[in-house]
């Protein structure tokens, strides 16, 4: 439960495991609409792990280092299933192969998305709304490019988000908590990598980054402010 304090806008105790409903809706939709391939199994396992970390954080307020370790492990699950960023398009033609930078770049990518969504989850409907818009953007681009598994996977995520957002608009009756925000961030990152692996196109990575451009910049400035203030 989320208790009110001077840093929060709500004035009563609120349940904050709404993210679990998003996760369950997503898994059900995926299982019913897509064949469970090795790639998809890796994404689902990583998503399940980050949900467990989120539940523990919502219940026990995990230390930042422990939560970060959990996020790193979620990213490592993707890497273990060969879902990683191995190349980027070279604007002058061909590809730029990351080689030994592939794994750390993938981990950084996943952690960044997780924390971007997590940090914007401060106002009713904000994280869900922004993530929902990002999901729709990915779906439209994926359908246009013919990446139908990516579109279906993202549609499952969007369905969970929009099913939840009705109860999260001001005045919210439930919060997604870290369970939801970290899961959504993880899934947006994983879907982008999955799309890039399947299509060999950097556009799959660019779309969610652009869709979350403002929160990403806000997060970057927040980190810089905190660093400069000690």
Image (tube, rainbow, N blue to C red):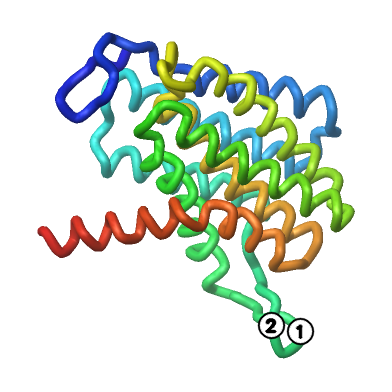
Relative depth, front residue between 61 and 98: 61
Residue 227 picture quarter: bottom left
**Which label belongs to residue 198?**
none
Please determine whether, in this image, residue 117 is positioned above or below residue 201.
above
Label 1 Cα crowd, 10 Å radius (few <14 / some 14-19 / many 20+): few
**Which label belongs to residue 90?**
2
Please determine whether, in this image, residue 199 is positioned above or below residue 166.
below
Residue positioned 71% across, 90% down in the render: 92
Q: Secondary structure at mark 2?
A: loop
Looking at this view, name the residue that lies furthest to the right: 146
| Alpha-carbon span between mark 2 and mark 1 | 5 Å
185 lies left or right of 37? left
54 lies left or right of 139? left
Residue 27 picture quarter: top right
Looking at this view, name the residue that lies furthest to the bottom: 92
Residue 219 picture quarter: bottom left
Asked whether the residues under the numbered discs 2 and 1 touch, taking CB atoms below 8 Å apart as contact, a structural biologist would say: yes
Residue positioned 60% across, 45% down in the render: 188
Label 2 Cα crowd, 10 Å radius (few <14 / some 14-19 / many 20+): few
Please determine whether, in this image, residue 120 is positioned above or below residue 174.
below
35 lies left or right of 209? right
Residue 41 in the image: state x and y as whole percent: 71, 37
Relative depth, front residue between 88 and 126: 126
Residue 4 in the image: state x and y as whole percent: 22, 17
Residue 25, visible in the rendered structure: yes
**Which label belongs to residue 94?**
1
Q: Secondary structure at mark 1?
A: loop
The quadrant of the image that shows the C terminus is: bottom left
Residue positioned 25% across, 62% down in the render: 224
Residue 57 in the image: state x and y as whole percent: 34, 27
Residue 181 in the image: state x and y as whole percent: 46, 34
């Amino acid at each position: 439960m989320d208790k009110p304090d001077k840093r929060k806008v709500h004035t009563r105790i609120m349940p904050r495991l709404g993210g679990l409903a998003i996760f369950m809706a997503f898994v059900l939709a995926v299982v019913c609409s897509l064949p469970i391939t090795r790639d998809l199994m890796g994404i689902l396992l990583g998503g399940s792990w980050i949900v467990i970390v989120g539940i523990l954080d919502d219940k026990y307020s995990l230390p930042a280092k422990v939560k970060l370790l959990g996020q790193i492990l979620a990213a490592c699950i993707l890497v273990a299933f060969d879902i990683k960023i191995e190349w980027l398009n070279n604007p002058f033609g061909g590809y730029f192969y990351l080689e030994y930078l592939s794994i750390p770049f993938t981990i950084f990518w996943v952690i960044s998305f997780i924390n971007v969504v997590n940090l914007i989850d401060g106002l009713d409907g904000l994280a869900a709304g922004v993530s929902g818009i990002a999901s729709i953007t990915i779906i439209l681009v994926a359908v246009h490019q013919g990446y139908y598994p990516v579109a279906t996977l993202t549609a499952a995520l969007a369905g969970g988000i929009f099913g939840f957002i009705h109860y999260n608009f001001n005045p919210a009756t439930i919060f997604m908590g870290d369970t939801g925000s970290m899961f959504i961030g993880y899934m947006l990152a994983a879907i982008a990598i999955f799309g890039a692996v399947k299509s060999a196109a950097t556009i799959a990575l660019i779309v969610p980054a652009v869709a979350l451009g403002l929160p990403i910049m806000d997060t970057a400035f927040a980190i810089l402010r905190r660093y400069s203030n000690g």
